[in-house]
Image: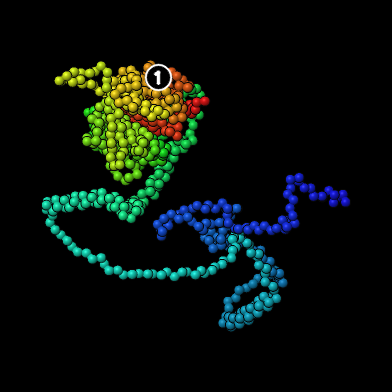
Amino acid sequence: EDRLTARALVKSPDQLELTEAELKEEFTRTLTADNPHTPKNIVRYSFKERAYKIVDCMDQTAIHFTLNGNLVPKDSDEGRRQSIRLSIEAEEAPVEEEEPPVEASAEIPEDSEIKDEEPTEDTEAAGEGEEEAEGVETAEEAEATEAEEPPPPKAPEKKLANQFNFIERASTTHHNPLRERGCQTDPAPFQTFSATVHQWDIYDAYVEELERMEKAKEKEKSKPQAAKKEEKRTGRRFSYVEPQHVDAVTKVAKAAKIAERMVNLNTFDDIAQDFKYFEDASDEFRGQEGTLLPLWKFQYDKTKKLAVTAISWNPKYKDLFAVGYGSYDFMKQGRGMLLLYTLKNPSFPEYAFSSESGVMCLDFNSEHPHLLAVGFYDGNVAIYNLRKATSQPSYKSGAKSGKHTEPVWQVKWQKDDMDNNSNFFSVSSDGRIVSWTLVKNELVHMDVIKLSVEGTAMQGPEGLQLQTLGCGTSFDFHKKIDYLFLVGTEEGKIYKCSKSYSSQFLDVFEAHHMAVDSISWNPFHLKVFISCSSDWTVKIWDHTIKTPMFVYDLGSAVGDVAWSPYSSTVFAAVTIDGKAHVFDLNVNKYEALCTQLVVTRKKNKTTHIQFNPVYPIIIVGDERGLITCLKLSPNLRKMPK
């Protein structure tokens, strides 16, 4: 009873109370011999279907124990050598034999002499007969002795120490017979043709080609009209879709691009790891200072002799940025290029566009990230549509459509107007701020304001008053107040303007002694903006106060300045001596936290700098067409409280 009492079932208080039906319910669990760790996503290239296919049948064998043995098969060369060596040793070993018993012995006295007599013929014959009789008797005795005595015991056979006894089993499998299938086709017909080509034949061919192109353009123009007529007639709306002619290269273009990115990711794996995971631990011992870690370098062979004139990140794809190439030297003007790079492929640009004039500025549309506005040195502006596979801009200004007469130094997209038409603004050295609107298939321009310089009115012929216009070099629109914008000029002045007033300014700042290279509103503080100039200074302003709040002398002409997207107190600037400067007003209001040389070659100047909107990196461009990507150390990207 005590033992039964000790073994009583103890239930926990939270145990479920099940009914008899629930207790008797069976749960079937199927056990399979599949290896749960076998990969399910192995892909191999199928030459039959010309595509990558997932492998269905995988080896499910799981090896739990492996032991390398030292047994040698008998049939191998090593086994035969050991067998021969052991057999030779067994033959050379001495065998102990028993001595036969002695039946009788006869002693011959020493004094006795045996005389050798010369045999005669009779004695010889008698001797031969006796020998034969003795020989017969000896053979018979030997046979009898052999029959009586048992054979000697054999020595025990030594077993080989290193032998592998195994059983051979074989089976025959059915071989599928090979089938051959052939067919015979007729040879393609061919004929030999020869002719003499003259100049008028070539001229006629060109004329026919031009006529064909004109007819194609007329057909394209008539297609929308035909669609409208059909819509009026039937009451239904149709849209014409141009059939796409896809060549063999276009089919594999996407796969080739992915493969190229994979190869580049493997090639620059150490840089990718630093970009994602590396944090400079030495910042703890530097106090407030920080460093810039060089990552990728972007360079294109056709832009080595061009300067980086503009940089802009794409608002949707955070790894994509556009770079404009041209020249700031008035005497060395020529062609320009527009390249779009991605951090996933630093070896080659994603898009490349060439232009007859140098690219001086560019800007992405925030609502339509595939639209890119570009300003050129010859005064034209253009819009590139990245969705269209063409090397020419979708829209471009001309002499008839209000182009600038001087280089366009900056373009900025604005919100769509009341009719949902995209529009952007441009500033140029001709003193005009122009608004460009996309209406249907053309660019419509409108002068917003002209930068007139006070006190420069001149008396012209016939009593005309000639007003000198200021040379605009940069401008920026307010982040919240749509109509408010700032304009920097070559004279060093900054004008606060409004879209509503085209004849006067809201305010004028005597900002710098030389040209204002860049101006930018703070993305967090609505009253603060920053400006930089070739007079070596960077100044921070409150637009309600005429004097600057902070002035920083960087010891060299400042090419560009940019606010950070993560903190209202962090900004970076580049100077023409090849250095990048990073400031944080929340940490140090007087000195830069980091001043680092970005370019190594002499006579090379850094021109532009931009923060990435998401990642803790900056990109810097120089006069040799090189784009350098740098990662900010933890001390340079502290978030404010």
Instruction: Inspect this view and state whether residue 297 appears.
Output: no
Q: Residue at x 14, y 58 (%)?
A: 195
Residue type at the position of mark 1: Thr
| Vertical placement of residue 146 versus 329, above or below | below
Q: Nearer the viewer, residue 614 or 61?
A: 614
Q: Where residue 219 sits: x, y (%)?
A: 25, 51
Q: Residue at x 38, y 16 (%)?
A: 547
| Vertical placement of residue 594 versus 58, above or below | above
Across the whole image, how many numbered discs are drawn on residues? Answer: 1
Q: Where residue 279 sits: x, y (%)?
A: 49, 31
Q: For the view shown, which residue lies furthest in the right direction?
A: 1
According to the image, label 1 marks what residue?
544
Occupied quadrant, residue 612: top left
Relative placement, left or right, of 462 versus 159 is left
Q: Where residue 459 sits: x, y (%)?
A: 18, 18
Occupied quadrant, residue 458: top left
| Vertical placement of residue 510 versus 267, above or below | above
| Vertical placement of residue 451 versus 267, above or below | above
Occupied quadrant, residue 159: bottom right
Q: Residue at x 56, y 51 (%)?
A: 37
Instruction: Inspect this view and state whether residue 345 appears.
Output: yes
Callout 1 environment at 10 Å: few (<14), some (14 to 19), or many (20+)?
few
Q: Where residue 121 sits: x, y (%)?
A: 56, 82
Q: Secondary structure at mark 1?
A: loop
